[in-house]
Amino acid sequence: MNKNNIFPLAIGTYGLGASRSESWEENNNELVIDEEEMKALIYSYEQGQNFIETSYIYAGGQTMKFISEFLKRVDRNKLFITVKIENFIEKVADIEEQLDKYLNILGIDYADSVLLHTPKASKIPLEESYRELKRLVSIGKSKNVSASNLSINQLKMIVEELGIELFSFEGLYNLECKQNEDVGILDYCKKHNILFINYQPFRRNRTANHNYPLLVELASKYNKTQNQILLNYYVKEKNIIPITKANKIEHIKLNLEALNFEMEQQDYQRLNDFRCEEFDKLEVDWEDVGGIPIYKFANQVE
Ligand SMILES: NC(=O)c1ccc[n+]([C@@H]2O[C@H](COP(=O)([O-])OP(=O)(O)OC[C@H]3O[C@@H](n4cnc5c(N)ncnc54)[C@H](OP(=O)(O)O)[C@@H]3O)[C@@H](O)[C@H]2O)c1
């Protein structure tokens, strides 16, 4: 599957499979499938949503087991599956070992892309980890390499020094948190044809809960929900791919409908100009040396 075939709204999986689970700690409990949740995921697939990403740390492994069940019910070849490598890579061989474990749980022979959840996952130099991801592509365990939560310098190093053609970059971007844009990562991805996948596009509904006057006004003007205004903005104005987790078919329908309208350019411009002071007061610790790393940034403000 190439970049042009990726549906403009990606499927998030954080917490999927956990609704019937007693614990989010890693556990070997047998997965109890919530069929409503499964129906919702299959509904997304049937509507053409084909980019899905997952991690073994979501819900203590339950999410991955849930997705393996989903993959038994759909055509795996119609999906682009990104798998995350987690804390900690102590030595190069740990990367292949993790990927093998996840492919085995998911019941698939290869990942469509593989990435490090955060640079901190790697206790060895980041370039060694990314060279290894590239090698895993050369032996067919993954079709592509992607990245997530990098600083602009780390991203440049991977693309320019290691010569890796990244498929996608998963990064925080939403109306209130534009830090990845401020440091040039959105532009860099555009320039290098790397799909920017923006996670927490609704900031888990906290953005809409603020009832910012601009969002309330646009929702009323276009007869949409605030979340639909947000998704429309990311796709139509920013040309990025929001990844949202939605357990409910009614939410998925609303999210898909958000792709089917246009706003006036002056309204997109007002969304471009929107800044959230509470977030702008904070600083991202791009090197992740004790401050607020980008992957924790969105949760710093209610
Ligand atoms: N690479 C990374 O470091 C990283 C970090 C964070 C997240 N991610 C990925 O990004 C995905 C999205 O982020 P997220 O799940 O944290 O946050 P999110 O997508 O901003 O918010 C998810 C929440 O929004 C609700 N929702 C979805 N559609 C809705 C609608 N139309 N109206 C009202 N509520 C709606 C969902 O409810 P229901 O489930 O009840 O429908 C869920 O509670 C994750 O699932 C994960 O796959 C990646």
Image: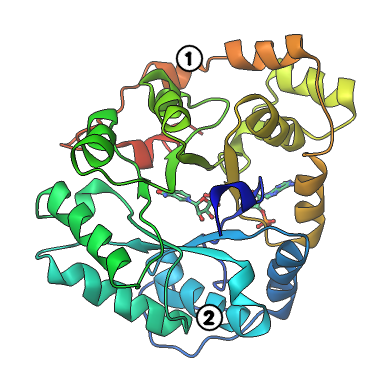
Residue 277's label in the rendered image is 1
| Scheme of colours in the image | rainbow
- Residue 32, quarter of the rendered image: bottom right
Rendered residue at 19%/34% (across/down): 287
Q: Amino acid at mark 2?
A: Ser
| Closer-to-camera residue (206/195) | 195
- Residue 113, quarter of the rendered image: bottom left
Q: Amino acid at mark 1?
A: Glu
Left or right: 74 in relation to 14 = right
**Residue denoted by label 2:** 68
Q: Position of residue 109 (x, y in %)?
A: 43, 81
Mark 1 or mark 2, earlier in chain? 2
Left or right: 168 in relation to 248 = left
Q: Position of residue 77 (x, y in %)?
A: 59, 73
Q: Position of residue 172 (x, y in %)?
A: 45, 37
Q: Position of residue 46 (x, y in %)?
A: 77, 66
Measured along the vertical axis of the image, is residue 288 above or below residue 134? above
Instruction: Answer whether residue 24 is visible to the viewer in this image.
Output: no
Label 2 element class? helix
Rendered residue at 39%/78% (across/down): 103
The reply to whether the residue tagged 2 has its Cβ within 8 angstroms of ligand 1 is: no
Quadrant into which the N terminus falls: bottom right
Measured along the vertical axis of the image, is residue 29 above or below residue 237? below
Marks 1 and 2: CB-CB under 8 Å?
no
Instruction: Answer whether residue 7 is visible to the viewer in this image.
Output: yes
- In this view, the mark in front (1 or 2): 2
Q: Residues within 10 Å of mark 2 (few under 14, many from 20)?
A: some
Rendered residue at 51%/34% (across/down): 302
Which residue of the protein is positioned furthest toward the bottom in this rendering?
Answer: 30
Q: How many marks?
A: 2
Label 1 element class? helix
Q: Residues within 10 Å of mark 1 (few under 14, many from 20)?
A: few
